[in-house]
Amino acid sequence: MKKNILTKNLFQVMLILSLFPLTVFGQQSTTKLTSLNQFGALEIAKQVNLEANKLGKNVSIAVLDASGTVILLLKGDQVGPHNTEASRRKAFTALSTKTASLELMKNAEASKDSKNLNTIAELLLLGGGVPIWKDGELIGSLGVSGGGGGENDHLIAVTAIQNLSFATKK
């Protein structure tokens, strides 16, 4: 019984301590945000789902930090399994090029010098990937797939990011 209470109290202390550094997200602070964290990724996912629901869609979501590491990867309910990987690649494309994947796709179509971008294995030139900027710093990226096409995926991603007072352009 004593061990059970001690374990429960230890778990509560660890939970509180683990959440403490995450409280900086969304609060005014002198600390400059240089990368997304897990808490931020979860907040972004909530916003993505809210925006997707407005369109009657379920989507797959990927959130990457500033180094390109996947923080969050969610497969949407009743969304094809390929959309999960597509979300990750859209987020990677947006992060590595610092450009929304829809914009990159349109630029590649319009320029014969850029048409070969679609041959780079990790890049995915479909709408739905956006870089995430905060105070002029690239802090991560978001990829959305399954919203009924690249335009919808892009709209969902951009709106979700803007709802959290982030930007998709420097």
Image (spheres, grey):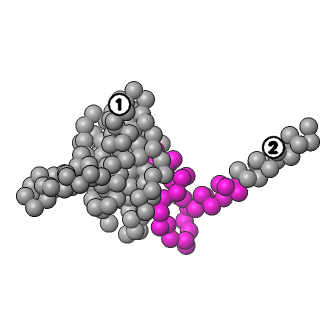
Q: Residue, x 11% and y 52% (percent of image)?
A: 109
Seen from this angle, which residue lies furthest right?
Answer: 2
Quadrant of the snapshot with the N terminus: top right
Seen from this angle, which residue lies furthest left?
Answer: 112
Magenta range is: 16-45
Where does residue 55 sit, x and y in percent of width and height? 33, 33
Seen from this angle, which residue lies furthest bottom?
Answer: 30
Occupied quadrant, residue 65:
bottom left
Where does residue 135 sit, x and y in percent of width and height? 41, 68
User: Which label belongs to residue 101?
Assistant: none
Q: Earlier in the sequence, mark 2 or mark 1?
A: 2
Q: Is residue 153 above or below residue 67?
A: above
- Residue 18 in magenta? yes
Q: Residue, x 38% and y 62% (percent of image)?
A: 133
Three-letter amino acid code of the residue under disc 1: Gly
The residue that mark 2 highlights is 8
Q: Which element is circle 2 on?
A: helix
Occupied quadrant, residue 97:
bottom left
71 sits left or right of 141 in the view: right
Q: Which element is circle 1 on?
A: loop
Q: Residue, x 48% and y 52% (percent of image)?
A: 71
Can you see residue 92?
yes
Can you see residue 102?
no
Quadrant of the snapshot with the C terminus: bottom left
User: Which label belongs to residue 80?
Assistant: 1
Three-letter amino acid code of the residue under disc 2: Lys
Q: Is residue 74 above or below residue 129?
A: above
